[in-house]
Image: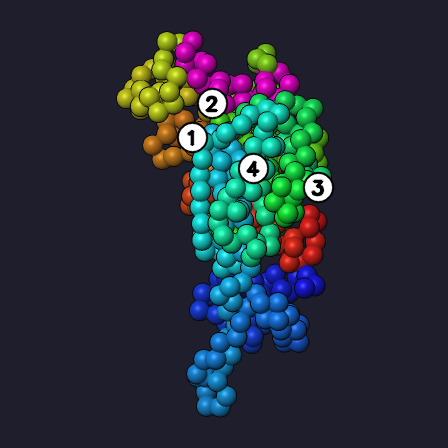
Amino acid sequence: MAGNKIKWQLIEALRQTPGGAARKQLCGQTGFSWGGVCKAAEELVAAGWLRGVKCPSATPGRPEIRLTFADAGPLTAGLDLGAVKWRFEIRDLAGRVLRRREERACARGGGFPAAAADFTARHLRGSGMKERIIALGIAVSGRIDSRRGVILSAGNQGVPPGSCLPLGSLVERTCGLPALLLPAQAAALWAEYGFGKHAGAANLILIHMGMGISAALLTENRLQLGRPAHPAGHIGHIHLPGNTRPCNCGLTGCIETVAGCQALRRDAAGRGLPENMAELNALALAGNRDAGELFREAASAVCAGAAPLIQLHAPEAVIFSGGQCREESFFYREVLRCLKGSLHREEQPPLELSSLDDFSAALGAARYALEGKVRGTGLD
Ligand SMILES: [Zn+2]
């Protein structure tokens, strides 16, 4: 099936119209011509992606034909390979979840690609739906070259800088499906753009605070991936003046060496505090001065990277995601307080927690892979 932009817009319009839509309505929703919509719809029906349903017309005459997704239509698979958890899910074109699995991350370092390919193959096989999957997206926490499908580094997963792990081709060989690799935070932002509270906003920033600290940018409806050697949004690896701590990215003095989970645990231990993040958070909330100070220093470091990014980019909203971003997190609250103090009042966009669940990066990676396939653009 030839790919094009109209087909993608029809799929997106139908996803947002659960009861299906007539072609005329789709012309209005997408802004495309009657001829263009009819031709694209015809091809999608012929390919088994859509079906027409006869509905009584509001006006006398012929029944109306509404287009909707075909029952046994194509599916997408998304994975999120994080430092702590590995997640897998399958969705249909309407975005409905058909299957989900979550496991503890099971490999680090050089063993990472083989274990990840095995994880993907095992869950695709186990789903019984592999034959229907047409797009596979994989989100990885680390530095990724999406065009070549390789992991360049993933410090929190033991993949050192200077690596070149060809996860994309390994998954394709093992599973028989081409895989699109995306940095996890970029994938999570793409999910926000399609499915989150600020879906459709042309300019967004996502700040991820989990094992590491990172950000992703959406500019004029385009996801910014940067270049492999200069990825967009890597705020965790901005240098903090005066900080001489070595970072697992190979540089010195990065924000993550103060605000990443590993740094927080190490600093907590150094101050005689518990290394467990939940216990540390409870102490800070209960008014423990040392625990509070630890999180305040970390929040100030996050803010040093995030505030200029927000000010320069001027997004419609800033969305926070990751294990450290919860209403009841002292660290998260301090980051918000610090950002509000750093940004001019007039330049403060809404700062909000993600409304999506823990599978958002898996969803975003799969959806980005699907869009590339339907539009025939791949990574444009
Ligand atoms: Zn670093």
Q: Is mark 1 within 8 Å of ligand 1?
A: no
Asked if residue 298 lies in the magenta stretch, the reply is no
Q: For the point 49% across and 27% down, which residue is it?
A: 211
- Does residue 209 show up? no
Q: Earlier in the sequence, mark 2 or mark 4?
A: 4
In front: 218, or 279? 279
Residue labelled with disc 3: 147
Secondary structure found at label 2: helix
Query: In the rendered image, which residue does mark 2 sit on?
Result: 261
User: Which of the numbered marks, if any, corresponds to residue 118?
Assistant: 4
Query: Crowdedness of circle 2 by 10 Å Cα count: few (<14), some, many (20+)?
Result: many
The residue where tag 1 is placed is 324
- Amino acid at dot 1: Gln
Q: Which residues are magenta?
A: 247-270
Which label sits in the foreground, 3 or 1?
3
Q: Nearer the viewer, residue 97 or 312?
A: 97
